[in-house]
Amino acid sequence: MNSHRVVVRKGKSIRASVAEIFGILGPADLRGKNVFVKPNMLRPARPEEHVVTNPRLLAETVEYLITDGAEVMVGDNPVPGRGYNYENEIAEYCGYLEAAGKEWRNIGRYSAKIKKPKNLLKEYYVSREVIDCDILVSLPKFRCHDLMTMSLSVKNHFGIVPGGYKPYIHALFPKIRDFGEVLVEIYETRPSDIIIVDCLDVVDAHGQVHHPGIVIGGDNGYAVDYVCALMAGIDPFRVPTTKVGRDRGLFDPQRVEIDGELPTIRGFSMPFVFPFRNRIVEFVAQILYRIWLARVPVIDHALCTRCLSCKNVCPPRAIKGHYIDYDKCIECYCCLEVCPKKAITIRFRLF
């Protein structure tokens, strides 16, 4: 197994750091390559909340790639909610439409079906743009996560799954270990070629904001997450996906080479650990995701023009005519994204 080089840069401009990371880890020639850039657009959030990828990092990465001759696409699949039901609405709120410009794509419209009979998650859907690109660049946000301890490179790949389909997968695998395995399975569908973690300004589990001013780059998601956990001051194998990656031989912690100085963030608080914590978190999460699954797409027949756009993109073929078969619906909301008249909305439905 080759060594895993992880690049840590602080005190330079974002552009200079991005250029160095690509210079060390990237392909020699980007000209004509189809590059997909995936930020972490978890939910509608302003940059100053520090829970989604900083739009400055996105903008500098996109500009660097374009200058080097790449054909760039940018996108992510957030979970609809909080009054923002469409990808582009959420992207605008996060500052990504301005940061990405004309390179932004709504990737929630068309999905590819993935079958992996030997996986825990034997069948699932991902955005086609991610599968079809030549180079995949991931821009995760360094942050805590109640279920996974930290949300980093591997967890960022959950965003290649269509928006509302994520709670469905959560509900299928409520146990932390199982969900960690599933996240690794999704990551391995199309691993990142280059990863640049946003550790510029981060918020801990108590809501305190820290300003490390760091970006961390690599080409192995598990090695990058390992180094990020060290910076957070925790055992890296508290992060389930990192432990699964090691156990499956997807990286060797003994072969991680850090290029640069790696500080520990002083006073960075993690989710509180107590006896039976995981069981309690799993139980609460299972209830919340079951409630979430009661949110379904509903067609407003007064607005519907019978164009059948929704039917044509529905991954499980749950739409017949202009009616939705809720026994087949997986709440991915691809229909929501493609409807030209916004005739489909999300509502709670009692089963």
Image (tube, rainbow, N blue to C red):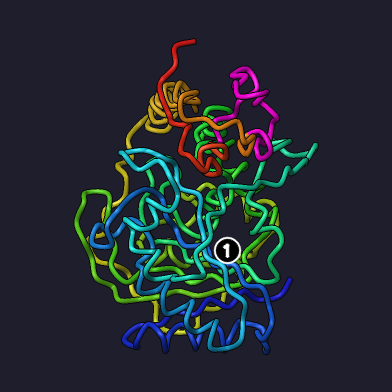
In the rendered image, residue 132, in percent from the top left (x then y), is placed at 71, 61
- Residue lying farthest to the right in this orientation: 117
Between 33 and 153, which is closer to the camera in this rendering?
A: 33
Residue 282 in view in this figure: yes
In the rendered image, residue 57, in percent from the top left (x then y), is placed at 39, 74
Could you say whether the residue bearing mark 1 is in a helix, strand or loop?
helix
**As drawn, is 190 to the left or to the right of 207?**
right
Between 252 and 147, which is closer to the camera in this rendering?
A: 147
In the rendered image, residue 327, in percent from the top left (x then y), is placed at 63, 17
> Which residue, given by chain and number where applicable, does mark 1 sit on?
221
Q: Residues within 10 Å of mark 1 (few under 14, many from 20)?
A: many
Q: In the rendered view, would you say 138 is above or below 271?
A: below
Between 239 and 12, which is closer to the camera in this rendering?
A: 12
Q: Which residue sits at x=39%, y=31%?
A: 281
Q: What's the residue type where badge 1 is placed?
A: Gly
Q: In the rendered view, would you say 280 is above or below 156?
A: above
**As drawn, is 256 to the left or to the right of 85?**
right
Does 138 appear in magenta? no
Residue 296 in view in this figure: no
Number of numbered discs visible in the structure rendering:
1
- Residue lying farthest to the top in this orientation: 351
Quarter of the image holding residue 232? bottom left
Does 330 appear in magenta? yes
Q: Which residue sits at x=35%, y=43%?
A: 84
Between 82 and 324, which is closer to the camera in this rendering?
A: 324
Q: Which residue sits at x=43%, y=85%?
A: 17
Q: In the rendered view, would you say 89 is above or below 100?
A: above
Quarter of the image holding residue 54? bottom left
What residue range appears in magenta?
311-332
